[in-house]
Image: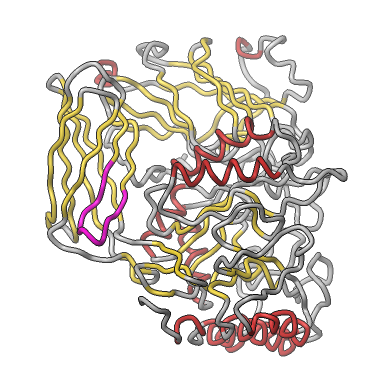
Amino acid sequence: MNIPREEYPRPQMVRKDWVNLNGLWEFEFDFGKTGRERHLIHKDKFEREILVPFCPESKLSGIEYTDFMNSVWYRRTFSVPQEWRKNRILIHFEAVDYDCEVWINGTSAGRHKGGYTPFTFDISALVTDGENTLTVCVEDDNRTGLQPSGKQSNHYNSKGCLYTRVTGIWQTVWLESVPETHIKSYKITPDIDNGCVHISMYLSSSYQKKHIAAKAYYEGKEVGHTTATSNGSSANFTLKLSELHIWQPLDPKLYDIELTLSSDGKEDKITGYFGMRTIEIAGNCVLINGKPVFQRLVLDQGYYPGGIYTAPSDEALRRDIELSLALGFNGARLHQKVFERRFLYWADKLGYIVWGEYGNWGFDHTKASALGIFMPEWLEAVERDYNSPALIGWCPFNETWDVNGSRQNNALLKDIYLLTKAVDKTRPVIDTSGNFHVITDIYDIHTYEQDVDKFRENFSVMSDNEHVYDNHKDRQTYMGQPYFVSEYGGIWWNSKDEKGWGYGTRPESIEEFAERFEGMADILLTNPRIFALCYTQLYDVEQEVNGLYYYDRTPKFPPGTMQRFKKALQQTASIEQNSVAGF
């Protein structure tokens, strides 16, 4: 059979020696979390089969079981090419929800907690010639308050804006062969003013001298090269560029990069790409490459009818961006989920700006002890996507409502904000989107007011430079930051089915829907104090019918109406008309 999701899963760090482990695996439920006691790892054959990387709740997995699963087990066999045995052998899991332990031939290779970020184990000492057995146990319970689970429902059924759960493996599993001394990761920081990039590399070995060669290419032409040496586990150097090409929203000029690490006569060569792009805050604007660009964003939940969290194909990831661009949006909030690396790749390639989030819902943010759970998972996401030129800001939390009468732990939000800024000094950070701000670079609010006149009245208070519309001013204080309406709209429409859930009053006709959409867009785009909007949402998700497309991505409205949406969004925004001192 064909391997599902067969494309290379890590586009910014590509090696030639790899094996995709997606496909049919053995599978077994473990509702009582007793599989270790029952020695499932030694069981001859599991009861079911599952198609990885699709979660067992999904139709594409072949299981389609949607009740709670406290624990599940996976197993398959694999063999490695003989020439790999002289190198290190790594196993990569792009994402597993939530607490995952991996065994190779009955011996534990390691454990990872966190449902959204990749992890790697060195299994060189555990593999043998011929067939090897890979066993995986995953524990998952989004009702404890101890794990971030995003929009996954904590009820038996999907409900309101909470959707079908995701358990276990939901992104690609793969093997890779690397030399003993190899590149573990790298961070690349563009420096447009000086026509160069600054590169930090993290290496596997620290006890011998290593030589590094870096080359940059633009459209196949070499435009920069340099060398460096390291005696440690890291290296920092600068690569000067002979030609400067700027990555812009909707005009994505990208460079290719080749990094080679040499040690003891062996080479580790990786290829990737980067974009030359800056982000700055100036007054009430977020500047991209020194210019005010109004961010016309759409809320993207990252759900798919057949795969839930997992897109059925790489083309489906690209298609979602193209559908958004076709309506006049230039980017998205990647909402309550860390999207897979291939989505970021297509955003980089298509010039589609995005804000990175984490799936914090379901997580109790009221306790000081929450920091120790949330911090490592969030920082893994920040490190993973640092190199993406499309990613222009971070938002670790969304709508931190009171939990059972207890307020958010402000120290938690502050600490995560400061840690994010320490790891990534190049991007703005929103502490918690919508509410309740503690320390933030951007002041954002959510509003689902459906009456256009009331909507206009709410934002009319921003006619001076002191006041802003703030629907939680009893819990947060505006301090002059750039202002972002990061959720609005959510207009309820579903002509195929009268059932469903949505915000506020439902329009009585397509014309009323279009007029409401146009009116709200005009109010936000013509306000000189607002630099960005985010419309809820791109497509319906299960019972939530606020999308501009149906869940299957077919258009909800006639072509002429869709063009009206695009025209409304693409009018020149006030911040794009009026220059600010220094621009």
Q: Is residue 297 above or below residue 57?
A: below
**Horizontal and vertical percent for residue 556?**
66, 76
Residue 68: quadrant of the picture: top right
Instruction: Please give the name of the residue rendered at 58% of the width and 67% of the height, measured from the top-left corner.
Output: 480
Establish if 509 lies above or below 469.
below
The answer to whether residue 539 is visible is no
Occupied quadrant, residue 564:
bottom right
> Residue 66 occupies which quadrant of the picture?
top right
At 41% from the left edge and 58% from the top edge, which residue is drawn? Answer: 346
Q: Is residue 210 left or right of residue 488?
A: left
Residue 43: % across, % down: 63, 12
Image check: 447 left or right of 176? right
Q: Nearer the viewer, residue 419 or 382?
A: 419
User: Measured along the vertical axis of the image, is residue 106 above or below residue 238?
Assistant: above
Which of 580/347 is in front? 580
**363 within the magenta span:** no
Magenta residue check for 192: yes
Q: Measuring 53% from the left and 54% from the top, which residue is drawn there? A: 429
Q: Which residues fall within the magenta stretch?
A: 189-199
- Frontmost residue, 375 versus 520: 375
Viewport quadrant of the C terminus: bottom left
Q: Position of residue 156 (x, y in %)?
A: 83, 43
Classified by dominant secondary structure, the portion drawn in magenta counts as strand
Residue 43 visible to the viewer: yes
Say if 279 sits above or below 407 in the image: below
Residue shown at the point (52%, 70%) measured from the top left: 323
Residue 401 percent coordinates (x, y) = 77, 51
